[in-house]
């Protein structure tokens, strides 16, 4: 990123975080460096389709920061399922350093890069897990161990619930990041949510600061244990969604 891009990103993030009531100069600096690392690495590894620095600040960093408007994450455990280049997990960890973050993805190359970013930005206590959610969710070390699960751009909500709800403790919450035209998708997921031990708590719509883009967090509370037959194999989840 050029010097003027770095300044523009930093300014965008400062304004955006202030709009969320999250003014924190240290976080602005770290998020700016993360944005810079993302766009630099994106030249050699496919990490994001967004190549404009200010767009990346808005549509990645501030989009993910919006989760803090609907969830209190200090000191909590959180698994980010299908984290890709670290969204939303890394942004949340930068803004809430006490968060106990686990990043899960089936692509190891992206996790390796995230490890390098954590080292370069001195972000400590991030666990990186290489694997598929539907397999990791059967691992007793991971099953029903987290207070929060997050996911953005991973799967349709019906399928996503089967990937994510097994990770949650009873009383935990899935924060699924969706578009505002997701009403039908949310309604279609209600039987899956119930079968997996969840309950739709609410949808939280927000406008990404500096833009007119409105996105939605679908919040699902886990109210009882997920039956042991879930998650199923991916082919089964796709072929016969709950
Ligand atoms: N969450 C990131 C974001 O919003 O930019 C990445 C989104 S990317 C479109 C989807 C990511 O989910 C990819 O990195 C992919 O490897 C991962 N993924 C998809 N299905 C998965 C599964 N069943 N288990 C683990 N990771 C998965």
Image (cartoon, grey):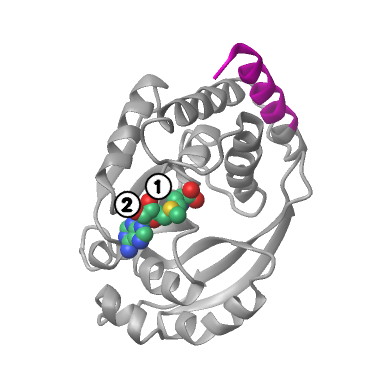
Identify the residue at horizontal 67%, vertical 49% (top origin): 69
Magenta-colored span: 1-15
**CB-based contact (under 8 Å), mark 1 and mark 2:** yes
In this view, the residue in front, 69 or 185, is 185
C-alpha span from label 1 to label 2: 6 Å
Residue 177 in percent (x, y) is at: 57, 59
Q: From the viewer's perspective, is residue 229 above or below residue 206?
A: below
Which quarter holds ligand 1? bottom left
Q: Quadrant of the N terminus?
A: top right
Tell me: 18 left or right of 95.
right
In this view, the residue in front, 237 or 226, is 237
Identify the secondary structure beneath mark 1: loop
- Magenta segment's dominant SS is helix
Neighbourhood count class around disc 2 (C-alpha, 10 Å): few under 14, some 14–19, many 20 upward: many
Identify the secondary structure beneath mark 2: strand
Answer whether residue 7 is magenta in the image.
yes
Residue 84 is marked as: 1
Q: From the viewer's perspective, is residue 102 above or below residue 156?
A: above
The reply to whether the residue tagged 1 has its Cβ within 8 angstroms of ligand 1 is yes
Residue 48 in percent (x, y) is at: 48, 42
Quadrant hosting residue 159: bottom left
Answer whether residue 211 is magenta in the image.
no
Neighbourhood count class around disc 1 (C-alpha, 10 Å): few under 14, some 14–19, many 20 upward: many
Q: From the viewer's perspective, is residue 120 above or below residue 51?
A: above
Residue 105 is marked as: 2
In this view, the residue in front, 162 or 184, is 184
Residue 207 is marked as: none
Decide if residue 80 is in sight here. no
Extreme residue toward the front, this view: 43
């Amino acid at each position: 990123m050029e010097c003027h891009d770095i300044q523009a990103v930093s300014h965008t993030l400062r304004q955006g975080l202030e709009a969320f009531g999250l003014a924190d100069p240290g976080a602005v600096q770290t998020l700016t460096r993360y944005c810079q690392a993302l766009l630099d690495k994106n030249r050699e590894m496919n990490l994001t389709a967004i190549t404009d620095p200010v767009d990346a600040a808005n549509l990645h960093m501030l989009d993910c920061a919006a989760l803090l408007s609907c969830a209190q994450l200090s000191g909590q455990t959180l698994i980010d399922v299908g984290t890709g280049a670290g969204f939303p997990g890394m942004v949340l960890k930068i803004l809430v350093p006490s968060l106990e973050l686990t990043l899960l993805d089936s692509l190891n190359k992206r996790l390796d890069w995230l490890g390098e970013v954590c080292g370069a930005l001195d972000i400590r206590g991030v666990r990186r897990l290489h694997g598929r959610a539907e397999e990791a969710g059967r691992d007793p070390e991971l099953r029903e161990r987290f207070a929060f699960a997050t996911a953005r751009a991973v799967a349709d909500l019906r399928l996503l619930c089967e990937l994510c709800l097994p990770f949650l403790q009873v009383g935990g919450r899935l924060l699924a990041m969706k578009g505002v035209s997701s009403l039908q998708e949310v309604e279609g997921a209600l039987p899956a949510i119930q079968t997996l031990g969840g309950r739709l708590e609410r949808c939280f719509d927000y406008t990404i600061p500096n833009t007119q883009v409105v996105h939605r967090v679908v919040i699902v509370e886990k109210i009882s244990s997920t039956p042991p037959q879930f998650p199923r194999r991916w082919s089964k989840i796709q072929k016969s969604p709950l």
